[in-house]
Amino acid sequence: MDLIMNRSLLSEGACFLKEEEAFSGVHKIADKVMRDIELVFGVRPTSTEAIDRLSSCAVIYGTIDRSPVLDHLSESGIIDLNAVRGKSEVYLFQVIDAPWDGGDKALVIAGSDKRGTIYGLFHLSEVLGVSPLVDWNDVRPQPKEEVRLEDGRKYISKEPSVRYRGFFINDEWPAFGTWCNKRFGGFNAEAYDHVFELLLRLKGNYLWPAMWSARFYDDGPGLANAELADEYGVVIGASHHEPCLRQGEEYKYLRGKDSIYGDAWNFRTNEEGITRFWADGLKRSGRFENVITVGMRGEADTSIMGKEATLADNIGLLRDVLKTQNRLMKEHVNPKLEQVPRMLALYKEVEPFFYGDKHTPGLIGSEELENVILMLCDDNFGNLRTLPTEEMRSHNGGYGMYYHFDYHGGPISYEWINSSYLPKVWEQMSMAYDFGIRDLWVVNVGDVCTQEFPLAYFLDLAYDFEQWGTSAINKTDAYTRRWVEQQFGGVCAEPDLKKIHQLLDGYTKIAHNRRPEAMNAEVYHPVHYQETDRLLAEIEQLMDTADELYKKIDSEAFPGFFSLVYYPAMGNLNLQKLQLLAGKNRYAAKLNLMEANGLTERMKTCMRRDQELVDEYHAIAGGKWYGMGLSEHIGFTRWNEDECRYPILMQVMPARKPRLLVSIDGTGQRSEGSAWHVNRLGLLDFKQPDVEEASFTISSLSDLDAPYKITCEAPWLSCSSHEGRLDGTRHAADRIRVRIDRGQMNGETDAQIVVQLPTGACTIIVDAKQPETGGFPENTYVDTRGYISMEAERFSAKKDAGQAGFQRIAGYGKTLSAMKVFPTTSYFTAGQNAPYLEYQFVFHQAGSYEAELYMEPSNPVTKDNTLHYGIQVNDGAIDVLNVIPAGMKVGESSDAEWSAGVLDNIRRHSSEVVCKAGLNSLRIYAVSPGFVLEKLVIYPAGKKPAESYLGPPETYYVGRKNEAALN
Amino acid sequence: MDLIMNRSLLSEGACFLKEEEAFSGVHKIADKVMRDIELVFGVRPTSTEAIDRLSSCAVIYGTIDRSPVLDHLSESGIIDLNAVRGKSEVYLFQVIDAPWDGGDKALVIAGSDKRGTIYGLFHLSEVLGVSPLVDWNDVRPQPKEEVRLEDGRKYISKEPSVRYRGFFINDEWPAFGTWCNKRFGGFNAEAYDHVFELLLRLKGNYLWPAMWSARFYDDGPGLANAELADEYGVVIGASHHEPCLRQGEEYKYLRGKDSIYGDAWNFRTNEEGITRFWADGLKRSGRFENVITVGMRGEADTSIMGKEATLADNIGLLRDVLKTQNRLMKEHVNPKLEQVPRMLALYKEVEPFFYGDKHTPGLIGSEELENVILMLCDDNFGNLRTLPTEEMRSHNGGYGMYYHFDYHGGPISYEWINSSYLPKVWEQMSMAYDFGIRDLWVVNVGDVCTQEFPLAYFLDLAYDFEQWGTSAINKTDAYTRRWVEQQFGGVCAEPDLKKIHQLLDGYTKIAHNRRPEAMNAEVYHPVHYQETDRLLAEIEQLMDTADELYKKIDSEAFPGFFSLVYYPAMGNLNLQKLQLLAGKNRYAAKLNLMEANGLTERMKTCMRRDQELVDEYHAIAGGKWYGMGLSEHIGFTRWNEDECRYPILMQVMPARKPRLLVSIDGTGQRSEGSAWHVNRLGLLDFKQPDVEEASFTISSLSDLDAPYKITCEAPWLSCSSHEGRLDGTRHAADRIRVRIDRGQMNGETDAQIVVQLPTGACTIIVDAKQPETGGFPENTYVDTRGYISMEAERFSAKKDAGQAGFQRIAGYGKTLSAMKVFPTTSYFTAGQNAPYLEYQFVFHQAGSYEAELYMEPSNPVTKDNTLHYGIQVNDGAIDVLNVIPAGMKVGESSDAEWSAGVLDNIRRHSSEVVCKAGLNSLRIYAVSPGFVLEKLVIYPAGKKPAESYLGPPETYYVGRKNEAALN
C-alpha cells in the first residue's frame, strides 16, 4: 500500500513527528514544509512529539545521531542508515510500514547531517510539486486532492559535487536595502530567514551576506542573523577583503585614536590593534559554521603595502598575516586548524604574491595555506580568469570560484535585472570544475531578485555536476524546460510552458548579446544587414508572447509569473527595444527622414513602459518586492549609474518641398534621385541562389504630398507596389518588397528598377547573377558580396584527436552556436595532436585576405596572457596566433580591449591569409583551453564588410535553402 | 542765380530738351530721370523737342557729336567740351545761363559718349537725392520742395578706373527665373530693362546675362534683349565657355544628325559645323557692343580634348581655335580686329595651355591673343588665384577678373542671400587692381537680389579706384555710411542711420566668419570659450535693432528697407541663430540636460521665422520680389541643395530622480557631484588681472524639484546666488555669477566654492593667482591658461622696409582685425628687406611650443603653390614657411584643405618654436604677397587649447583693462 497524503488524512491527526533531540533549525524547516503541504492540500498538517499520535500519513524526519526514532528504525532493520552515515549533506527518503501502533505508512527522511535532513525535507515539498521558489517568488503549487508515495519508495540522495555552494548579496542599494528596510525594518533575521530558505531550497549551503552598507553580525539585531544561519546550517562566508569574520566596513566604525583596534589598517604599524580586531571577530562569530577569509588587503580594494614595497616585502607581510590569523583561529575557533574552513582569495594584487616570480618564491605551497581553499574569480563579467594548473590542482585545501551574475563596476555595471545566459554559465562553470575548482562556488547575485533562474541553475550545477556539468553538453535547454515546469507546470498548459521557455531563452540570449545597461543607440547598426530590424522583430514577437501569457495567467500564479518571467523578460526586451529605436531614430534624423518623429513616440512609449514595469513589480503581491526594481538601468556612461543618460529623442523638421529618399534595405545606400548626386543604387540580394525576396524603402523628408512611381521592365522581378505617395506624417515610409521568379529569367541576370521621385529618379540596379556552385561539396560557402561569413558549426570536416575534439554548443554564439574543444583542460600542438575544424569557401579572385574569427571573450587560463589557435589555408603553413591583445589587462576597465570584449561579449581576431581563386579550405586548430569559436569572416585585405554589431550574416553555402534576404 | 527746381517751375513748361539726334537709349534714360524727378517733387517733368518751349529749369542732355545744341553751346563758348571729348564714359555737368529766349538757367549734361551721357543723367538723379536703387529696390527719395543747383556749378566726371565693370546673373533657378517668369513672362527685355537700369545707375557698363537655362539672344523675345542692351550702352559678355556670342546651352538645342552645325562639340572632328555655329553667332549679335569670349572648352566644364592628348596637342588645338575665331570676327564683326573687344578666360584647364611648360611654349605672348583681355578668376569663394606676374602685366589686351558674391558649387554653394563682407572685397579686388587687372571686372551676383550692397561697392571700386581702392585703406566703413545715407538719408534720422550701418556691418561680418549655407550645429563650439553664447548675444542684439527699425520705418520706405537691409540681415542672423541653438541643443541633449527641450522650441521659432521672412519678402511691394527668396539655404550636406537637412531637434527625457549638473562656463568641465566621478572643477578666469566676473551654470537633468546650495568661505569672492532649486521645465538652469574683490584677498589666491547637489557635492577650485607682470612692457601677453592667444594688431613693434610695411585692416579678421603688407605686389626676403611685426609674451616654462598663425585663406598669387612668411623667436634663426599645404588644389572641392579654408574663411598654419621661460619675442616677416595675418596662438607642443571655431580668445596683456571673463 502506498503512503497517501490528502486533505482528510492530513486533518485526521498529527502528520510530522517532532523529536526534541532534533536540530532546532531542522524543525523550522519542517514547519516550512508543513506550510508547503497546506498550499498543496489546503490543510495545514500538525506535528506531535508523541509518535503514537501520528496520523496514517506520517513523516519522520531527523538527523543521524540526533534522532532516537531513526536509531530505533535502523536497529529494527526497517531502514538502513549506513548508506547515509558519514556522508555530507545526504538524506534517505523512504516510505516504510509504520512499526508503531495505529500507524500505517510513514515517510522517513533521515539526513546524514543537518543540511542533509533539511534537503530531505525540502525534497518532500518538491515531490509534492512545490517549487523551491514558493516562498521567495510566491510560486503556487498545483492544489491536489491526493498524493501517493508508492510503497517501498526509497531514495538516497547524492553528496553534492561542490562543497560550498552559494551566493553573494552585493551592491545592496538601492534595491535589496530598500526592500529589507521597508518590509522588515532592516537587514535583519526576518529578512535573512527568506534568503536562507531560498538558498537551502535551491540546495545551496553557503552565503556571503550583504556587506556594502549592512553589517550582518550587528543587524540581526545583534547576532540574530548569524544565529539563524547557524540553526539552518547556512555557512557564512565573506568576500576577499573581509578576513577573520570581520565585515568590510567594520574597521571603519571601530577605528579611532582611542580605539583598542588602533587607527591604521596596517599590519606593520598597528599589528596589535589589527590582531585584536581579528581576534574579537573570531571570538564573536567563530562558533558558527563559517568559511573564514584569510589574508589581508589594503583598504578600499587597494594594495596592502605602499608602492615602494618589493614583492618579497609583500609576500613576507602576507605570510606574517596568515601566521597570525592561523594562530588566532587555533585559539578562538578550533585548535585543530585543519578543521577550520578557510579561504584565501587569489585576486588582483594577491595573485602575484601567491605565484611569486623567478627570484622570489610566492606563497604557493606554503604551510600557512595548508587546507585553505584558494578562491579564484571570474573577470566580473562571467569569464573565468587564471585557473589552477595541473600541478596546482593537488593543493590540499582545494579551490573556489567567485562568479558574477551581477556586477557593480567597470566598464559598465549590470545590476538591475537578470542578464545571464545559461549556456555561458554552463560553459564557464563546467570548465572551472574540470580545472579542479570543486570546493567553493559563490555567485554574486546583487539584489537576488530576477536572478532566481540562473541562480537555480548555478546551484543545481554545483550540487549535481554529474547531471548538469561537462558531460551534459547542450542540456541547458532541458534544464530550462525542467525549471519552467517546476514553477508553472501546475498552472500552465503545455503550449504556454513552451512559450515561457521561449521567453526565458529569448530574453537571456538577447541580453547575452548585449546587457541592458550596456545597450545604447550606437550598439547595433541601424541599417546594415537589417540587424536592428531583425532584432526588433524578434523582440516584438517575444513581447507579444509575454503579453499573451500575462493576460492568461491566473491570479494565484501571477506573482510568480510576473517576478520570474514577465518582469525580467519585459524589462530586458523593452529596454533593448528602446535603444534599438533610438538607433533608428538617430539614423533617420540625421537624414531628415520624417519617420524619425514617429520613432520618438515609440521611444517614449518604451520609457513609460519601463517605469510601469517597475511600478507594477513594486505593487504586486502586496508590495512584496517593493524596492527590488530601483536600480538605474538606462544609458550608463560610466560604470556607475551617475551621469547615466536616456536616449535622445531626435525630431526632424519637414523639408519645404516634397522630397523622398530611396534606400536599399540592409545597406547604407540611398538616393533622392538628384541628377547631381548618387542616383544609382545596387540590389545584390538575389545573387544568393536561395534568396527570393529583397526590399527597398521609400521615406519622406517633408510633410508635403509626395508621389513616387516604380517601373521595372524585367518580367522576372515583381515589386509589391508600383506607385504611391507619402505624406510624411501618418504615412512617412513605404517598404517595397521585390520578388524574383528565377524561372522567368531566360539567361537574363541584370535589371533596373526605376523609382521616380519628386526631385529626380533613382535607378536600382538589380544584379541576380548567381555564383558557380556546381561541383562544390555541401556547406561550401560561395562569395556573392565580397566576403565570406561562416557560422562555426558549418564546417565541412572535423578532425578529433583521440578523446579530444570540437563539439558544438547550441545557442552559444551571437548568431547561432559555438564550437569548443573537450576536454576543456587540454593543450594541443597544431599540426600534431590538435583537433581541428575545416571550412570550405570559394572566392573569385586570388589574393590577400583577412580572416576574422569571432570568439567568446575568454581570458587566458594561465598567467602568460595567451590564448592560441592555429590557422591554415589550403596547404599553407599553420599560423599559431594569440587572440589576446598584447598587454591586455583582464578585469581592468581602463583596458579598452578587455572592456570591449565583455561589453560586446565577443572577441574578434584577424590575421592575413592568402586565398586562391576558386575553392579554398581553411583549418582552425585548437591550441589553448578557452578557445570558443562562433563565426569566421573572410574578406579581401582592406575591404572590411560594412560595420555592424553582429557581423555580416552567414554567406550562401552549397545546400542552403530558402533563406531570407540578408543584405 | 541758381538753377531752381521745384513743383511750380516743373509744372510751368517742358524741362528736358529731347533732341532727335540723340541716342534712343539716352532718351529712355532721360525718361527714367524724369520719373525720378517726379518722385522728388511730385510733378513729372515733360520734355520737348523745341528749345524755346523749355521752362526756366531746363535740362539739356546729349552726347558729343550727337547734339546740335551742345555744339552750339560749345561754339558759343558757354560750355567747353574739350575736357570731355575723346574720353571714355565721361560727362560734363554744368549750370549755365540759358542763351535762348525765355530761358533763365539750364543744366547741361554732355557725355563724351553714350554711357557718359547716361551717367551724367543719373548724376542729376543722385544730386536730387535719388538712390541708384530707386527702381530695383523701390528706394524712395526724400520729397523736396525745391532744389537749387548753384550758379556756375560745373563738374567733369572722371574716366572709370576699370574699362568693363559689371555683373553676372547666374544659377538663375529657382529665384531669378521664377521672378522673371512670374513678373515679366520670361527672361525678356521687360525684365532686363530693370537689370540694365540697375547696372547703369551703379555706373557699371557690362553684363553677363542669365545663361543656365535662359538664352539671352532668343528670350527678348528674339533679339529684343540684345537690342535694348545696345540702346542703353550695356556691353554684353559671357562666361568662359561661351565663345563667339553663343550661349552655353545653345549648341545643345541646335546640334543633331542633320544639323548644319553637326553633332559634336569638337573642333577637330566637326570643324566645319563648329565654325559655322560661331560664325552665325557673330553674324547675329556681332553688331552690338560686346566683349566676345574666345577660346573653347569641353562641354559641361570638361577639358577640351581627351585624356590621352598631350599639352602640345591641346595648345595646338586652342591656337587653331583662336585663329579661326579671329578670322570669323574680322569677317563678321570688324575687319579691324584690334577694335573688337575679346576675352579669354585663364581658368581651370586653360591655365596650363596658356603657360605651357618647360618643353612646350604656351599661348602666352602669342599673336592670336594680341589685344585679348585675359580673364583671371577667384577661387569661387572670393579669394584671388594666380595673378599676372610683373612681366605678364605688359600684355596689350590687359586683364580681367571674374569674382564671386554667389556661387553654385563645391564645397558648399552660397546663393540665397548676401554673405559678402566689404573689407574682404576691398582687400582682394584692390590687390587685383594692383596686380594690373584693370580692364574687366565682373562679379557673379547669382539672382542679383540682396547683393545690391556689395555690388554697389564693387562697381564703385571699379569706377573710382582712386577714391576707394588700395590707397583708401579702412574706408569700407565710410563707404557703408555713404551707402546707408544714399538709401535712407531722406527717411531716417541720424541714430537710425547708424543702426542700419551697424546691422549691415554686423550681419556681413558674421557671414564672413561663416556663410549661412555652410553653417551647421558643429561649426562653433557650443561651450568652449562661450563662443556660441557670445555670438548668440551679438545676434540677438542685431536682431533687436533690426526689429526696432522695422517697426519705425515708414511705409513708403519700407520696401527698400526690407529688401536691402532687414531681409538679408534677418535672414542671415536668424539662420546663424538657428544653427547656434542647434549646437547648444545637441550639446545639452548629449548630457541629458533639460534645457535641451527649451532649445528645440527656440529652434522651431527660428525655422518659422526663416519661412516668414521669405514669405514677407515675396509679398511686399505688391509681390515685386516674388521668387527671389526661393533658394534652399539650410543645412547643406553637399555643394548642391539636394539632400540638405534641417538641424535635428534633440529632446531629452527627464531622469527619474533629481539630478543637477554644474559646469564651468566656457569650458567642458562638468560634474554631478558623484563621489565616484569628477567632482572637482577649476575656475581659472581670475588669473587674468582684469577679469572681475566669471560664472558657472547649474542645469537640471530631471523634471523633479532639485535644490542646490552654494557655499564659499573666501571673503573676496561673491556668488550671485547661494541657493536655489530647478524644476527642469520652466526653470531648467541657473547661471551663477562669481565676482572677485581683489582688495579683500590679503595674499590669498585660492578658494573653493562648494555646490551641494542632489547626488553629491561639486567643489569649484578657484585659482586667482595672478601672473607676474611687473617690468614687462605694454602689450606683453602673459600666460594664465597654458597658451598665448594674440590679436595680430597687438604687436609690440613694427618694422617697415622703405615704402613697404604692415598695415592694419580694421574689422578684417574673425575676432578683431588683420595685418597685411602694402604695397600688395611686393616680395621680400626675411631678415633682409622684409617688413615685420614683433610680438612679446611670457611663458612660465622654457620648452618646445607650437606657434599657430590664423590667416585669411589667400591663395598663392603665382603658379608655384607657395605663400611664405618668416618666423623668428628671440634671437633664433628665421624659419621661412609655406602656409599652403603641399599639393593643395585651389578651387577643387575634393581638396579638403582648400575646402576647409573657404568654408572656415581661415587658414591656420603651425610651426614649432622654442621659447624660454619669461619674456619672449616673436617676429613675423612678410615674404609673399597675399599674407594676411589675423591672430597667433602659441601653446606647449602637444597641448592644444580646447577646440573652437574662432580659436581661444585673446590672452591677457600688460595694459589691458576690464575685459569680460573669457574662459
Image (cartoon, coloured by chain):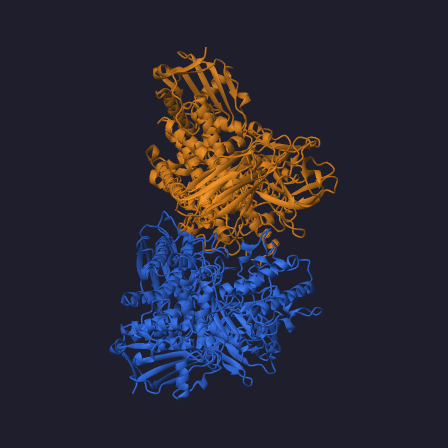
Chain colours: A blue, B orange
Q: Nearer the viewer, residue A884 or A289?
A: A289
Left or right side of B125 for A54: left
Q: Does residue A891 appear in the picture of this structure?
A: no
Query: Which picture quadrant has residue B934?
Result: top right
Q: Does residue B360 appear in the picture of this structure?
A: yes
Q: List x then y, in percent, for residue A475.
A: 43, 78
Furthest-bottom residue in view?
A: A77
Q: Quadrant of the N terminus of chain B?
A: top left
Q: Nearer the viewer, residue B807 or A204?
A: A204
Furthest-top residue in view?
A: B1
Furthest-left residue in view?
A: A8
**In this figure, what is the number of numbered marks?**
0
Q: List x then y, in percent, for residue B184.
A: 34, 38
Q: List x then y, in percent, for residue A354.
A: 63, 69
Residue B813 vertical placement versus B42 (above, below): below
Left or right side of A617 for A868: right
Q: List x then y, in percent, for residue A339.
A: 56, 74
Identify the residue at image location x=51%, y=59%: A409
Left or right side of A388 for B213: left
Residue B962 vertical placement versus A201 (above, below): above
Q: Quadrant of the C terminus of chain B?
A: top right
Residue B202 vertical placement versus B643 (above, below): above
